[in-house]
Amino acid sequence: MPKTPKHSNLLARGLRRAWLRLAPRLAAGAANGDDPWWKHSVIYEIYIRSFQDSNGDGVGDLCGIVQRLDYLESLGVDAIWLTPLYPSPQVDFGYDISDYCAIDPRFGTLEDFGRLVREAARRGIRVVLDMVLNHTSDQHPWFLEAAASRTSARHDFYLWSDGRTDASGKRLPPNNWTSLFGGSAWEYVPALDQFYYHRYYRQQPDLNWRNPQVERAMFGAMQFWLERGVAGFRLDAITSLIEDAQLRDEPVLPGTDSLGDPNLDHIYTDNLPETHRVIRRLRAMVDTYPGTRVLIGETYLPNTAALDAWYGGARHNELHLPMDTLLGLVDRLDACTFRRHLMEAATAIHDSQPLLVFDNHDRVRSWDRFGDGTHNLEIARIVAILLFSSRAAALVYQGQELGQRTATPTRREDVRDPMGISGWPREKGRDGERTPMQWDASPQAGFSSNPETWLPVSADYRSVNVHSELGNPRSLLNWYRHLIAMRSSYAALRDGRLVILDRDNASVLTYARVSADGNVMLVSLNMSAATQTINLDLAAAGIAARRIISLLSSPHEIPDLEVGEALTLPPYAAWLGVVLAHRARRHTQRRTATRS
């Protein structure tokens, strides 16, 4: 395993010197002992299959994660979110669970999991598990029993319907609900003469959360893991937990989706009020455990107001961190859109803590979504500053910190994701964002000793990898490391209030983070391909300043500013500075400048 170059363990010299000089003023109060650990956390998603293979079978595993914990510690990660590790037929790569209280042998054993939790804890890293509450595998013992007889004790664990009969006597589904993976959401079981509901694949039948026995059983599965030291759960597909009891048709919208099905307004299968009652009971149960456990939600919602409800609004009694995916669904940089969203996140969620998400295992990587083919690296740095300098906890998906690309298959025969197989060529699936982590320039990028990995390693792994980027002070990885370290050290970036500046600028997003004791950090991001010059009117925002020290800039060095001096930003520039409010001795310093 390659070693980290010595110089990469230190922040770039200029930035470090600036920090040493400014630290007494800025670091005071950086760690608020009253805040729960998750409030300012950096959570790192690990797609287990693709992170590190320890046994040479071409698939990542738990022991492989243990091997890479030192890297995660050096990055500054507070918690790791593991995609499902439970026994599964792997139809949906683990999101079809057949046993909630065991480890899939592909990934290891319960002993391996215990070792991972212990070794992570030694490094100050918590472990969060993906928990799939919406559905099980059709191979789960509950469903096998449910599908055996209408009178079985488990039959009502799932959502069944007799359906409808047309004029010819043909059995039809009860309504127009569609699966997110294509076709009707209802699967007919001839032996029972009934349909069961599946929001995802037919091999993933939805649980019936109107049955109290389901809630008791699923809460019990979560308690199994809480007692083994997990820090909490990321709740998959949580907004679709409960469906309309009357099974009414959903309104049809214009057009078709990527799988060719009619677009529907999911008012009867998503975000129903009854789901919130379940979440409140779940929160109450989790809160009984010591150590401040966390509930993170996969929450794809139309707006910030809808997101607020998943916190529990003013009561703060539902999810701790529903995922703010609204910017993650945007496909281009737009200063006005990002500004509006940051303002909403600061004012419209009852002072709850946002969790900002740009990348995950289901979404084309932000490198490709936002990149223009020329300035991708500069744009990736803009995304990173947004992630770590806004008033939010941050989620990083493995490889995002390297600038790992989406490697979309070009032939149907190469696709592994069933969604891509059934939807090709309009829908190419999610393999492209799930390729193995790129550790070094050795064969298979250091991910595996097996030349036949479950997905092929991306072609650019010889240059885009952890080892080479650690050795390059100007790499995207070291940009991430600088930002995470600054965020954990300084009160203003950690929990300061957000002050939007230059509110009408259509090209540049500028804001300040102001700590409780008045220390100020400034961020300015040029989201355009043209050079932009702005004036930072700090006095109008109530910010006292004498001088502004540049700490971090891209694509090249931006000098310090005197108050009133214009800030010139090259195309797709990212800049972070600190305000000096009092007269101080002049120092000659070198700043961190990252060049493409």
Image (tube, helix red, strand yellow):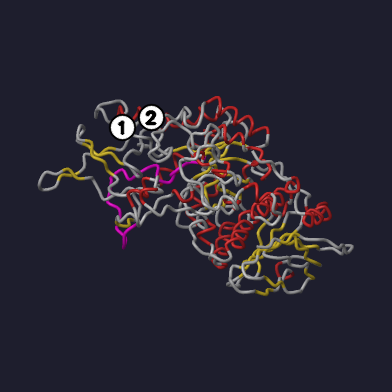
Depicted 451 relative to depicted 497: above or below:
above
- Locate residue 158: give its quadrant: top left
Q: Cβ–Cβ below 8 Å for labels 1 and 2?
A: yes
Mark 2 crowd level (few <14, some 14–19, many ≥20, 10 Å Cα): some
Question: Which of the pair 217/424 is nearer the observer?
Answer: 424
Taking the magenta stretch, the answer to whether it contains residue 256 is yes
595 versus 239 height, above or below: below
Residue beneath disc 2: 213
Q: Which residues are magenta?
A: 234-257
Q: Nearer the viewer, residue 487 or 511?
A: 487
Disc 1/disc 2 C-alpha distance (Å): 9 Å
Q: Residues within 10 Å of mark 1 (few under 14, many from 20)?
A: many
Q: Quadrant of residue 4?
A: top right
Q: Secondary structure at mark 2?
A: helix
Residue 377, how many percent across, how many down? 60, 60
Query: Which residue does the image show at 74% across and 70% down from the upper left?
Result: 539
Question: Farthest left residue?
Answer: 168
From what the image shows, is residue 16 above or below residue 111?
Answer: below
Residue 320 visible here: no
Q: Amino acid at mark 2?
A: Gln
Q: Residue furthest right?
A: 585
- Please name the amino acid that badge 1 sits on: Asp
Q: Position of residue 540 (x, y in %)?
A: 71, 71
Q: Is residue 25 left or right of residue 80?
A: right
The residue positioned 58% from the left and 60% from the top of the image is 342
Q: Residue at x 23, y 45 (%)?
A: 174
Can you give x and y, in whole percent of width and height, for residue 429 in the image? 40, 50
The mark nearer the N terminus, 1 or 2, is: 1
Q: Secondary structure at mark 1?
A: helix
| Residue 475, image x, y percentages | 66, 55
Q: Which mark is residue 156?
A: 1
